Every structure is written in C-alpha cells, then in structure tokens.
Image: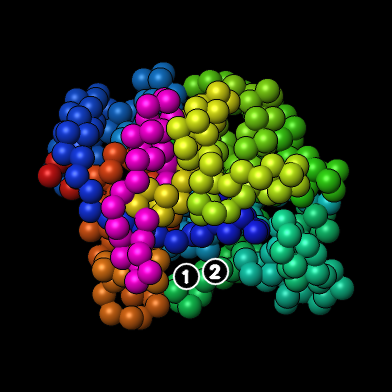
Amino acid sequence: MGTQGTQGTQDSNQQTGAGGTGRRALLGAAVLGATGTVLGLSGTARAADSSRSGKGLKGLPVPTIIGHRGASGYRPEHTFGSYQLALDLGADIVEAGDLVPTRDGHLVCRHEPEIGGTTDVADHPEFAGRKTTKVLDGVSTTGWFTEDFTLAELKTLRAVERIPANRPHNTLYDGRWEIPTFEEVLKWQDEQTRKRGKQVWIYPETKHPTYFRKLGLGLEERVAKLLHKHGKDRKNSPVIVQSFEPTSIQRLNKLVDNPLVVLLSGATSRPWDFVEAGDPRTVADLVTRAGLREIAGYAQGIGPTLDLVIPKDAAGNLTTPTTLVKDAHAVGLVLHPYTMRNENPFLPTSFRKGTDADAYGDSFGAFRTYFATGIDGVFTDNPDTGLLARADFVNG
C-alpha cells in the first residue's frame, strides 16, 4: 500500500489515546479464549489459528498485525527477504505485494510502477533510454516504469531501500533480491504454509488500476486469473485484496469471492477512479455512514489512513478519535488502518524521541493508543513491535 498519486495517500503514522475499555476487554477475551498457537511473546496471549478455524478473515487474531510490504522496517520492501522476515517475526498477514504490470502483462510486486527509487535500474546503462516522464494519476512523474519493461528485463534488476535516510541499516541489503512476481508470491505462500504448518496469509493491492486499464493492462482480470489458477479465489481463501480505487474492488467483487478491502487516503482526497469518472465525492464522503454502507455492499473491510481514525492537530499531535471505528463496525466492516512505523518522523509528535530521522520513538505508546480505538488490525513496517504491542494490549 502507499502513495496513490493525487489521492494524497500518506504513509504517515498516527496514534492516540482513546478509551474503549469495554472493547478492549471484549477483544482480550476473544483472543485469549481462542484456540490456537501461543504467541512467542510475553504473557499468555493466544491468537486464533485461522488455518484450522475455517473462518477466513474472521478467524484471524485481533488486532491483526499486517507486515507492510513485508518487514520493510528491516529489509528493502517487496522482496522475498522482506516477506520472509515478516513471517519469521510472526506477522499474521504479509502485504505481498503492491501489484503493477510489466509490458508483457505479468504482475510484479513494487510499491509504485516507477521503480527508480526501489531498484538499481539507474545503474543499468542498457536501460538509460527508458527513463521518461509520465502523468500518473494527475501527477507528473519522472523515472522508469514497469509497463515499459518485459518481465525478463525486470528480473535483471535488484531491489534497494526506498527511504535510506530513515533506514540506513537497510541499505546493507541493497542489491540482494530481485523483483518478485505475484505468481511467485502465491507459490511462496503455499511453500511457507507447508513448512510452518500454519496458513500464511497475503494482502495484495491493485495499484493505479484506472491508469493501467487505459494502457490495456487491466489488473483485476490478471489478479483473478492467478487466484483462480492457484485455488485462492474463494470466500475463506487466505488472500485479501485491497485497492485505493473503489471501482477496482467492485470489479474484483464480480470476479472473485476473496475478502476485499477499500483503502482510504486523506479525508479531502478523491480516489483517482472518481476523478476520471467525474464523481465529485471525496474520502470524507466515503467514511460517512451512508458511504460505509455502500462500501459494505461489495467489500468486507476498509484500510483507512490512521489520521481518519485519530486526526492530528497542526503540531502533529493526536486529537480525539473519530466515529469511524464504530460506524464501520456498525455495517459489518473490519478496519485495517495504515501505517505504523517505529521511526520518529512517522510517529505523532508526542511519541517522538529526539529529532533523528532514523531513531525510534515511543512506537509502543502509539500502537497502544490506536489499538484502544477498537481497530481490527494495523499495517506496520515492524511486525515484531506490533506483536509485542498486541500482547501488552491483550494482557494489560
């Protein structure tokens, strides 16, 4: 998941202190009472083992810890190194991956179609002529784009750390891993499920679907075809599909039975499919009770930015939680907000420690504040931190 052009998606992190004692007690009882694997963490927290529950999305531990692009706090994002580490750290779900197409129609996992910031493509003189400027969801963007490369060409590239100023240690792993395809991820999911004796879940996203459809590279049909091929297109399949464009989720709803999630950026932003279609609604309209009821007609959940759960003031401090959690739950939607990160710049101001861009702040305090709102899960670049925070929350 991530920045979605003019939608103004912000991979920010927010957290706040909210009440919700009753909800917390309820969640604690639900998680502690579930049969499943004992978490390798403090206390006696037990997480529901969805591989045996047969309940699909509802069988996941709550709050669910979702490894954002893997364990991207520790490894370059959307690599098998990052995905593997997320599982090793105990993530309930791995966001593998943000799906973009190649020129020859394959789906690969990259944060954006522009790959200058996440691969070593600039170091390949044979691809210097591919650098170009395109308008991506209304934003002029210069770089190299996956749709201008064949899969074979992309496989000659290697992933690099996207935000080295915040994660200098991750640059140690620059050049180690190639770009994974979605089909490779589906096979990896099966291999890891067998090896670990526990169902591995993934959470792919269709990226810029309107943009790619206009290029003749429709994403939804390609996603559905692969899910069907691998027997993972059912209601309880361990694959949740997400998108910032509601019409992409509506299209998927007609092609597969998987759990589906609508991602929601800043309140004043407009999904790009709305912009293209002349739909004047903003995200603020989608998070009204009427908007949520509509979403519940074709999706099982929402992935709001954390600011939609607890807004921040001008100084970057958390304010009063909104009614989004209550309103979404009232129409049967789960909430998986994004994105929790440990580093100072991504935390609400009051949770920062010092000013260093790569230093950790009080992320446990931030997790605790967000969990207290009753959210069903959270995307995080640091799954191990999230799991410890959940154990504190459930056992506290």
Q: Earlier in the sequence, mark 2 or mark 1?
A: 2
Q: Position of residue 71 (x, y in %)?
A: 44, 55
Q: Amino acid under label 1?
A: Asn
SS class, disc 1: helix
Asked if labels 1 and 2 touch by Cβ distance under 8 angstroms, the answer is yes
Name the dominant secondary structure of the magenta segment: loop
Magenta residue check for 127: no
Q: Which mark is residue 161?
A: 2
Q: Quadrant of residue 356?
A: bottom left
Q: Which residues are magenta?
A: 311-337
Left or right: 389 in relation to 70: left
Q: Is residue 290 left or right of residue 380?
A: right
Let me know if residue 238 appears in the view: no
> Which residue corresponds to mark 1?
170
Name of the residue lying farthest toward the front: 280
| Residue most extreme to the bottom | 355
At label 2, which amino acid type do we have? Glu
Q: Is 149 on the left-hand or right-hand side of 173? A: right
